[in-house]
Amino acid sequence: MSEQRKLELIDATYEMLKKMPPDQISARKVVAAAGCTSPLIYRNFKDMDELILLAAVRFLERYIVESPQLFDESQDPLVMLDSTWELFAKHGFQNVDVFLFLFFSQHSKEVGDAIEEYYQLLPDGWRQFGGMFTTVLFDGDIYDRNLIVVRRVASSGVFDVDDAQAISDMQCYLFHGMLMKYRDVYRDPAIAAEGLEEFMRLFRSQVEHYRIK
């Protein structure tokens, strides 16, 4: 199977993810959409989860493009924490089902590898989006990644260092819970925007609560 045909299957699955959650996508539906056979899918992907995971990566493209400038180590750590969460949450509330699948399921530790594999299929895209950057950005799970930034904020004197783990975990729990709250309604852009606003309000309230006065 050519890489082009493999991309066609990923594209067909991506279009389905715009309309339905990952758990509603089946090989039969992909076959019908892509005009292929089931054996063709399983010869090139170990299972449907791998195909769906690669298709879900496409929803991260805009986030990946916008992210690098936020991870400037010269900026204030608290500003970095706030701005990175706001950008991540903006895309999360626009694509709730996909973000739950990518970051709060058994597939969360596979995201970095999936991004690398996806962009290897698209050499031009790999250069545009910074493949090495994205692999590092999504290495491990969301809890580990957030803790790195929160510890940096704590080291700057904003939080008590002993509170860093709890602060980081609560931020991730809040995001997960808010995604679940909006799961059935987020496809309305206005409601997705409301979800982002509510999340950031609660997030900033938590930061202020733990901030050393």
Image (spheres, grey):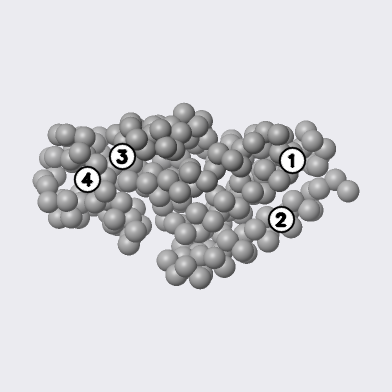
Percent x, y of residue 126: 38, 34
Q: What residue type is labelled 2?
A: Arg
Q: Residue at x 29, y 34 (%)?
A: 121
Q: Mark 1 highlights which residue?
A: 76
CA separation, marks 1 and 2? 16 Å
Q: Mark 2 highlights which residue?
A: 204
Percent x, y of residue 108: 45, 40
Secondary structure at badge 4 equals helix
Find residue 105 and report its image quarter.
Answer: top left
Along the line of sight, the residue nearer the viewer: 139 or 39: 139
Percent x, y of residue 166: 70, 43
* Mark 3 or 2, closer to the camera: 2
Q: Which amino acid does label 3 sit on?
A: Glu
For label 2, the crowd category at 10 Å Cα-Cα, with few meaning under 14, some 14 to 19 and many 20 or more, is few
Q: Mark 4 highlights which residue?
A: 9
Along the line of sight, the residue nearer the viewer: 166 or 140: 140
Q: In this view, does 11 lie above or below 126?
A: below
- Earlier residue among tags 3 and 1: 3
Q: Mark 3 highlights which residue?
A: 50
- Earlier residue among tags 3 and 4: 4
Residue 87 left/right relative to 119: right
For label 1, the crowd category at 10 Å Cα-Cα, with few meaning under 14, some 14 to 19 and many 20 or more, is few
Q: What residue type is labelled 4?
A: Leu
CA separation, marks 2 and 4? 41 Å
Q: Which residue is drawn at 65% across and 58% down?
A: 200
- Earlier residue among tags 3 and 2: 3
